[in-house]
């Protein structure tokens, strides 16, 4: 129901070259849901596509790497900010949001506030400004987190890779054999 045309239009290749990219809708779903549940790091989102059922579902059991997620966010920063506002407005209209929180659960809870309560234009404009500030803050936090993790782990690295000496099965086997030999020597002594 959301207008993704500004994002979709930039991903249509006409010449048929290059590897097929992850579908932009998949990446948008990961970002929107990830930010809604507090995952702002591209590396966290990448790991979640392996470890967490909701993310696996939203990613159609595909696993875009953190560089892809981060680059997508950076390229479409303005469009994503507008899209996040659409999501917040839609959730607000459906009664699923209080500023900064999105409820995924469909439970009905008795309350003494009326959904039909009217708001003035000034109040709605004030809320929209708060949402703009929140979206801007979240996007800046995500950028800062990605930059900090790039400094910590290095660009293109997830941070959970094996050390280089254990990167291949042969190296692992050699390391295990050496450790086993050391243990046998210690046992003989």
Image: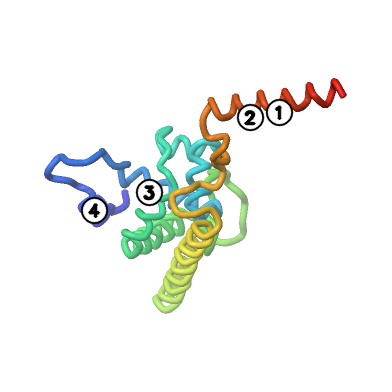
Query: Is mark 2 in CB contact (under 8 Å) with mark 1?
Result: yes
105 sits left or right of 32 in the view? right
Tell me which residue sits at (22%, 53%) in the image.
Answer: 10
Residue 123: x and y in percent read: 45, 76
In the picture, the quarter occupied by the C terminus is top right
The residue that disc 4 covers is: 5
Q: CA distance from mark 2 to mark 1?
A: 6 Å
Residue 82: x and y in percent read: 34, 63
The foreground one among 66 and 87 is 66
Q: Earlier in the sequence, mark 1 or mark 3?
A: 3
Q: Nearer the viewer, mark 4 or mark 1?
A: 1
Query: Is mark 4 in CB contact (under 8 Å) with mark 1?
Result: no
**Mark 1, secondary structure of its residue:** helix
Res 114 seen here: no
The residue that disc 1 covers is: 179
Q: Which residue is most to the bottom?
A: 122
Q: Is residue 138 above or below residue 159?
A: below
Query: Is mark 1 in CB contact (under 8 Å) with mark 3?
Result: no
Badge 1 density bin: few <14, some 14–19, many ≥20, Cα 10 Å: few
**Mark 3, secondary structure of its residue:** helix
The residue that disc 3 covers is: 68
The foreground one among 175 and 153 is 175
Residue 46: x and y in percent read: 48, 44
The foreground one among 84 and 70 is 70
Q: Earlier in the sequence, mark 4 or mark 1?
A: 4
The residue that disc 2 covers is: 175
Q: CA distance from mark 4 to mark 1?
A: 57 Å
């Amino acid at each position: 129901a959301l207008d993704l045309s500004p994002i979709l239009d930039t991903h249509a290749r006409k010449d048929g070259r290059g590897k097929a990219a992850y579908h932009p809708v998949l990446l948008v779903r990961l970002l929107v849901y990830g930010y809604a549940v507090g995952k702002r790091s591209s590396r966290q989102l990448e790991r979640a596509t392996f470890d967490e059922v909701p993310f696996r579902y939203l990613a159609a059991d595909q696993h875009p790497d953190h560089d892809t997620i981060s680059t997508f966010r950076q390229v479409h920063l303005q469009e994503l900010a507008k899209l996040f506002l659409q999501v917040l407005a839609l959730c607000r209209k459906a009664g699923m949001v209080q500023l900064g929180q999105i409820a995924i659960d469909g439970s009905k809870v008795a309350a003494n506030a009326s959904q039909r309560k009217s708001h003035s234009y000034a109040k709605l404009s004030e809320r929209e400004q708060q949402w703009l500030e929140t979206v801007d803050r979240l996007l800046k936090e995500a950028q800062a987190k990605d930059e900090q993790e790039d400094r910590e782990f290095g660009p293109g690295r997830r941070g959970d890779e094996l050390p280089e000496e254990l990167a291949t099965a042969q190296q692992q086997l050699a390391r295990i054999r050496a450790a086993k030999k050391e243990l046998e020597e210690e046992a003989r002594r």
